[in-house]
Amino acid sequence: MEPIDLLVKGIGRLFTPPGNAPRYGAEMQEISAIIDAVIAIREGRIALFGPVHEVYQLLEGVEIRSTIDVGGRMVTPGLVDPHTHLVHGGSREHELVLKRSGVPYLDILDQGGGILNSVKSTRAASEQELYDKASKSLKEMLLNGVTTVEAKSGYGLTLEDELKQLHVVKRLNQTNSIDIVSTFMGAHAVPMEYKGRTEEYVDLVIDKMLPKVASEGLAEFCDVFCEEGVFSVEQSRRILLEGKRLGLIPKIHADEIVSLHGAELAGEVGAISAEHLLAATDEGLAKLAEGGVIPVLLPGTSFYLGLCKHARARDMIDKFNLPVALSTDYNPGSCPTESIQLIIMLASLKLKMTPEEILTACTINAANALGRGSDIGSIEVGKRADLTIFNAPNLAYLPYHFGINHTFGVIKDGQVVVWNGQITALERKKEETVL
Ligand SMILES: N=CN[C@@H](CCC(=O)O)C(=O)O
Ligand SMILES: [Zn+2]
């Protein structure tokens, strides 16, 4: 057998969902567990894993170039955060006060605040400023145990400023170990200069932005905020279908606040995922199931906006047999947190998901929401060696002891990038080398 580059030993408990496919409904509860495990890594991928005695037998006589001992800790696949608005300028702490005094999120947007406030800051920021700010967020995510993250544009809303955000995403992906998957979201809001002329803005997205983004290969997905007062179902359909024609896979912010039937649209256009879904109807959820659309739930957002309801995760899992995924929705307005571990806690308390379902939702189902189920999201031979090592005795401990970071270490593509809760010299060096 070829030499092993890194042997990860001393794994007290290894937990992973099985296989590459999304895990539907009751399958989300099925987690493979191995007590006293080892993982052998070659060329950044998992070469072997299993109980100590079995793997050691197979490795007899094989050269092992380096070994690390995780001291009996718990190991899972690297976490995947499939919905973030990572790159933006400025912050909106003043809106928290407004929201607490009862001003609704969509009213703040209608008055030129909310997303449009971040649009002003993002337009005013240089590419370097956006890069530096997002870089700090990425470090937080990595320290939280995330090894792949999606990042949307949507705070530029001119061709030039959307491209600026997407170029930052591209550069961050080159300089950080964490993988960043790019989504174009020119239809995140109607910019001030197009107020009352939404159709004309939709034309701009379709005629100017989508062709440029697609021809420069700057995004894999196209997303739309389908919401009352933002983009209608018909406008969202036009944008998503045109994006799809140009090779961008549809995603959709659907039925977050008002039941517009965005979930039905997701099924109709063959979206890979539909996000939020607090107000999705039973018919909408049935269409998601029919269309093989992954619901990406964002409990941090409903919690932070103080919405009285949360997405119906239990119905999605128990009645509609859906493969639920979870995400931070990290953004400067409705959910300013990079902490996937906070989301894990909210998924338990507010969405009533079990620890096993939560792991599935943050790994293989999230990976499939990004079209990467065969590469990441579970511990399987041949997949990327993306692993998170937790200072926790079992899965149930993660949502239980909340408000702290449980990550001890992170291995990304077979490299130790976080150890003892700190970014390693190796990761810092990578950034310096590329820059
Ligand atoms: N709902 C629309 N977009 C973001 C919020 C962005 C913002 O408020 O800046 C979301 O997914 O929650
Ligand atoms: Zn979002």
Image (tube, rainbow, N blue to C red):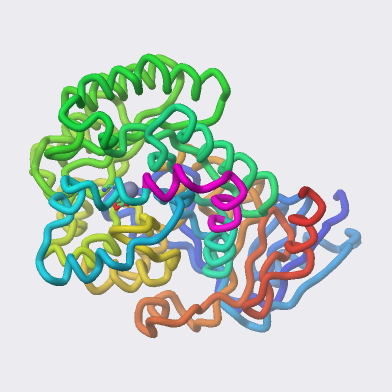
Residue 170 picture location, percent across and down:
60, 39
Determine if residue 274 is in view. yes
Q: Nearer the viewer, residue 392 or 297?
A: 297
- 178 w.r.t. 265: above or below: below
How many marks the image carries: the answer is: 0
The image quarter containing residue 361 is bottom left
| Residue name at image x 37 percent, y 66 percent | 356
| Residue name at image x 51 percent, y 40 percent | 165
State left or right for residue 390 relative to residue 404.
Answer: right
Residue 40 picture location, percent across and down:
74, 60
Residue 393 picture location, percent across and down:
49, 83
Residue 251 picture location, percent across and down:
34, 35
- 282 w.r.t. 6: above or below: above
Q: Nearer the viewer, residue 209 or 108?
A: 108
- Residue range (magenta): 119-134
Task: Examine the residues drawn in magenta and state their main secondary structure.
Answer: helix
State left or right for residue 300 relative to residue 11.
Answer: left
